[in-house]
Image (cartoon, rainbow, N blue to C red):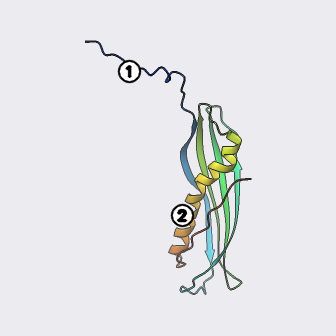
């Protein structure tokens, strides 16, 4: 018995395209806190500086975006803790996406990596006795 192939005439014109996250990796992490910290402190002010950097696309349509976070936790004008965290995202472009690669590298890729940095800093602070340090969201639009 011969099987009939279910062919959609429009399927031959549709080629999937977009960007795929291959991995998000921690490159660097440093953290320090004051030894005289009061563990009952609530309301630490966050000073953050976020720097995304895109790297050139490889011939196989893969590229890397690096995101660096410099963090200072301030309480009553005193620096309670600092962190420097760098993570990379490895992405793959396939097909012909509607969003340009430059825009993806500048906006979407950092937005994908940032929650991993937030989670890493949250855990570092929690393990050092500073509870509930949750960074604000960041809009990466230029």
Q: Position of residue 63 (x, y in %)?
A: 64, 41
Quarter holding the N terminus? Answer: top left
The single residue placed furthest to the top in the displayed view is: 1
Q: Earlier in the sequence, mark 2 or mark 1?
A: 1
- Whether pointer 2 and pointer 1 mark residues with C-beta atoms closer than 8 Å, the reply is no
Counting other residues with Cα less than 10 Å from the Cα at mark 1, is it few (<14), some (14-19), or many (20 or more)? few
Counting other residues with Cα less than 10 Å from the Cα at mark 2, is it few (<14), some (14-19), or many (20 or more)? few
Could you tell me which residue is drawn at 64 percent across and 36 percent down?
98
Q: Position of residue 10 (x, y in %)?
A: 50, 23
| Mark 2 or 1: the one toward you | 1
Q: Position of residue 57 (x, y in %)?
A: 67, 37
Residue named by callout 2: 119
Q: Is residue 142 above or below residue 61?
A: below
The single residue placed furthest to the right in the displayed view is: 142
Secondary structure type for disc 1: loop
In terms of image quadrants, where is residue 87? bottom right
The single residue placed furthest to the left in the displayed view is: 1
Residue named by callout 1: 6
Secondary structure type for disc 2: helix
In terms of image quadrants, where is residue 45? bottom right
- Left or right of residue 97, residue 6 in this image: left
Q: Is residue 54 above or below residue 92?
A: below
For the residues labelled 2 and 1, the Cα–Cα distance comes to 45 Å
Could you tell me which residue is drawn at 61 percent across and 70 percent down?
31
Could you tell me which residue is drawn at 59 percent across and 31 percent down?
95
Q: Is residue 71 above or below residue 17?
A: below
The single residue placed furthest to the front in the displayed view is: 9
How many labels, in total? 2
Q: Position of residue 59 (x, y in %)?
A: 65, 31
In the foreground, 32 or 77: 77
């Amino acid at each position: 018995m011969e099987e009939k192939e279910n062919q959609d005439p429009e399927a031959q014109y549709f080629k999937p395209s977009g960007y795929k996250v291959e991995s998000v990796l921690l490159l660097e992490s440093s953290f320090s806190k004051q030894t005289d910290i009061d563990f009952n402190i609530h309301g630490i002010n966050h000073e953050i500086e976020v720097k995304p950097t895109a790297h050139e696309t490889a011939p196989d349509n893969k590229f890397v975006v690096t995101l660096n976070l410099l963090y200072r936790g301030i309480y009553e004008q005193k620096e309670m803790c600092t962190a420097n965290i760098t993570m990379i995202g490895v992405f793959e472009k396939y097909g012909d996406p509607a969003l340009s690669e430059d825009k993806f590298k500048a906006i979407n890729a950092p937005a994908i990596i940032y929650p991993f940095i937030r989670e890493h800093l949250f855990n570092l602070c929690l393990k050092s006795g500073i509870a509930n340090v949750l960074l604000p969201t960041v809009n990466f639009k230029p």
